[in-house]
Image (cartoon, rainbow, N blue to C red):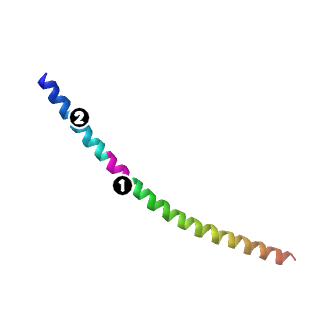
């Protein structure tokens, strides 16, 4: 009986440690992901804006050329 209980205890302790580690890892990755997403969104908005400006300019140029 005692031996079994001891084994159970050590197992549960190990599992708890694993849980803690995984939780910490998740937090770290999520934080990193968030900052990465923010950077991406910043670049994306800038890129899309300049992209649309370029398109409009090209359209104007082509229309003036054809006219």
Mark 2 closeness class: few <14, some 14–19, many ≥20 residues within 10 Å: few
Vertical placement of residue 27 versus 12, above or below? below
Element marked by disc 2: helix
Q: Residue furthest right?
A: 67
Name the foreground residue: 45 vs 64: 45
- Check the picture and name the quadrant holding the C terminus: bottom right
Name the foreground residue: 58 vs 10: 10
Name the foreground residue: 25 vs 1: 1
* Mark-to-mark CA distance, 2 and 1: 24 Å
Region in magenta: 22-27
- Check the picture and name the quadrant holding the N terminus: top left
Point out residue 53 in the picture as x, y percentages from the top left corner.
Answer: 68, 73
Residue position for label 2: 12
Residue position for label 1: 28
Vertical placement of residue 65 versus 12, above or below? below
Q: Identify the mark at residue 38; answer none if there is no mark.
A: none
């Amino acid at each position: 009986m005692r031996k079994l209980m001891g084994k159970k205890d050590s197992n549960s302790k190990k599992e708890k440690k694993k849980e803690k580690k995984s939780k910490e890892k998740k937090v770290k990755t999520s934080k990193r992901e968030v900052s990465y997403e923010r950077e991406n969104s910043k670049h994306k908005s800038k890129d899309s804006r300049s992209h649309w400006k370029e398109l409009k300019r090209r359209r104007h140029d082509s229309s003036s050329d054809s006219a």
